[in-house]
Amino acid sequence: MKFNYDLTNKVSNFIKNSDLDNIGIGCSDSQVIKVKKTQGTYYLKISKKGMLTSEFEKLKWLQGKLNVPKIILYDISDSTEYLITESVQGEMVCSDYYINHPDIGIKVIANAFNNIYSVDIECCPFDVAIDYKLSIIENNVKNKLIKEEDLKKETLEKYGTLDNILKYLKENKFYDDLCFSHGDTSLPNIFAYNNKFSGFIDVGECGLADKWFDLAICEKSIKRNYGEEFIPKFYNELKIIPDRNKIDYYLLMMELYL
């Protein structure tokens, strides 16, 4: 196994005599490795120092509050961070099984959202509400981290430029309907076991935010994986009347959100 970074002794000792599978490259050259040991399966994330701090702190805060991966090891060197977590039981709700059984998948997803809404936000220290999100996309636009050719054709036809989209989003922001937010409720981050919700992964963007942000992300992912006809079923299962104004606002925001 080729590592992008040097390993600390703690990490080396944990993965010793394990089956390793390099499963992907994340942002800023992070490395994600599947670690199979006799006692179970784990995931090792390695990144530049500072890139995993938020995810570690949020996973730590969420232990016992929401079904998320259990932290096994967190370590830091002079320039690098390492995070090892237990795998979540089951499979993604965009696996072949759920693609072929979307009605079951919708029930699992609705249950996942009910779990999100059960998290008490009174002492939540993480603010990822609308001003936070607008600051991220403003940085993306100003630093040319996103290009006009990355946008949908109809978006460019309507707004013309990235600056115009940013201007629209800033001038039309609304008060958040605050709840706990996962931050990326796309189907690959929602897991099920025996057709029941079993947990979330990738919680680095979680915190206090408008509930319609998570709903918009999930709607987009349901359309991509199951088909547009399952979006009304999703809202019916949650007993929510969709706020199209807010959903469309966040769908537009996501085109500039990395």
Image (cartoon, rainbow, N blue to C red):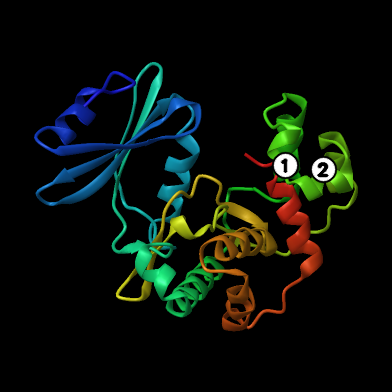
Q: What residue is drawn where x is 75% and y is 51%?
A: 252
Q: Give the label on residue 151, or none.
A: 1
Q: Is residue 135 above or below residue 218?
A: above
Crowd band around label 1 with a 10 angstrom C-alpha radius: few (<14), some (14–19), many (20+):
some
Image quarter hosting the N terminus = top left
Residue 109 placement (x, y as % from top left): 49, 71
Q: Secondary structure at mark 1?
A: loop
- The answer to whether mark 2 and mark 1 are in CB contact below 8 A is yes
Q: Earlier in the sequence, mark 2 or mark 1?
A: 1
Q: What residue is drawn where x is 43% and y is 79%?
A: 104
Residue 17 placement (x, y as % from top left): 9, 35
Q: Residue 81: tell me if it is visible.
A: yes
Residue 105 placement (x, y as % from top left): 45, 73
Q: Nearer the viewer, residue 152 or 19?
A: 152
Q: Which residue is mark 2?
A: 156
- 93 left or right of 220 in image: left
Q: Is residue 241 above or below residue 35?
A: below
Q: What residue is drawn where x is 48% and y is 75%?
A: 111
How far separated are the C-alphas under marks 2 and 1? 7 Å
Residue 143 placement (x, y as % from top left): 72, 24
Q: Is residue 51 above or below residue 230?
A: above
Q: Amino acid at mark 2?
A: Leu
